[in-house]
Amino acid sequence: MARPAKDTAKTTTTQSQPLLVTMSHWIPFLVLVVSLAVHHQQLATIDERLVALETTLSTQAIELNSLRTALQQATSDAQRTMTDGKATGKETKNGEQDVERGLEQISQASSFEPDSRTIKSSAPTVDTQTIHFVYGLWDKDPMPPQFQATISAWERVNPSWTTKVWTEKDIKELWKSEFPELKYLWKKALPIQRADIARLMIVLVYGGLYADLDCSPTKPIDEAFEAAGFRFVQHNTVLCLEDDKTPEQSAGTARWPIRKGVPEYHRRVANYVFWAKPRSEVIEAALSLAVKRVNETPKEMYHVRGRPDLNNPYAIIYTTGPDVLTEVTFPQENGRNPESSTLVVGKGKCHMSNKATGTWIGDQHPAWGQKKSNA
């Protein structure tokens, strides 16, 4: 009877071996599961820190704006005190001290730069909550009521943002001081091209949101950005699609001489409204491409073939307009994939109404450096 017992033990040992082998196969999987759980926790922690940083950035921006307001008020009070002819020496000194304290507070607040690793602006003031407008590069008359109403609408819908209208004088000064190597381009470019280039320069140097004067908001900027998934610590640029066709629908544009056989990318980015931090890579690339195209595009391309008396609006779209932003946003060399720091908002989702009045389109038009026709 001893022999059967020995056989039974041997059988039990043999059966246990496959089980051990099976368990050894599961060990790497269990290690992977534990590793993934740890990484998930780390990602969750990082996300919490990002949210906290966003909150801090918002708070700092609010405090900075408050300090700027306080400085402006202190400066105004001091100047009023020193020039009204009634101020005593003590009052004048107090006013000067108020200004100095305000300047010191601004200096301390400005030492905190959001995402300083990517912001390398040489601008004297960095404020990404400014809405920029351009007027007067060919319209020499006072700003018409409908454009004034547009600015008022932006201010009403976005009370925490500031607005600035850039005149021809302002733009010339910016062009000369920040881009002296492009001084020659002022004369070479048409007035409408100057407007396209100027908006890129303004946002590249100062940051903020640019908007055409025929573009009105239908929702606050902050709400529109939040709905689109904007995160200040991640995104350097926010762009809106003005057209979203299929590749087949855009294929025919390859026949247009100015495109040299390359069709326009079917997802066109608007240049009538966009936002960026100072020194945004996308805006900088757009400016470089615009300069290149202005330099290289023959004069005959600006007119309808065989009709030098008729302007070709697409020449502007291609050289300095939407096509420039489109090409750098969806670069061919990158498989037409935007950078992760660029937020592209779908057509109609920027919550802005572009009336597209086309104040630059026409023949014998001052936007093209031409005198108005008397006809």
Image (cartoon, rainbow, N blue to C red):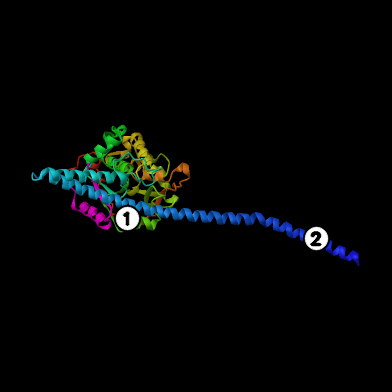
Residue 151 percent location from the top left of the image? 23, 52
Give the magenta-colored segment's residue range.
141-167
Q: Residue furthest front?
A: 90
27 relative position to 338: left or right? right
For disc 1, the marked residue is: 221
Residue 197 percent location from the top left of the image? 31, 41
User: Which element type, helix, strand or loop, lies under badge 1?
Assistant: helix
**Magenta stretch contains residue 373:** no
Q: Are marks 2 and 1 in contact (CB under 8 Å)?
A: no
Of residues 242 and 308, the one nearer the viewer is 242
The N terminus: image quadrant: bottom right
For disc 2, the marked residue is: 13
Residue 164 percent location from the top left of the image? 24, 47
**Magenta stretch contains residue 149:** yes
Residue at 27% x, 44% y: name it.
104
Q: Is residue 126 visible?
A: no
Q: Is residue 191 visible?
A: yes
358 relative position to 21: left or right? left
User: Which element type, helix, strand or loop, lies under badge 2?
Assistant: helix
Of residues 232 and 251, the one nearer the viewer is 232
Number of marks in the image?
Answer: 2
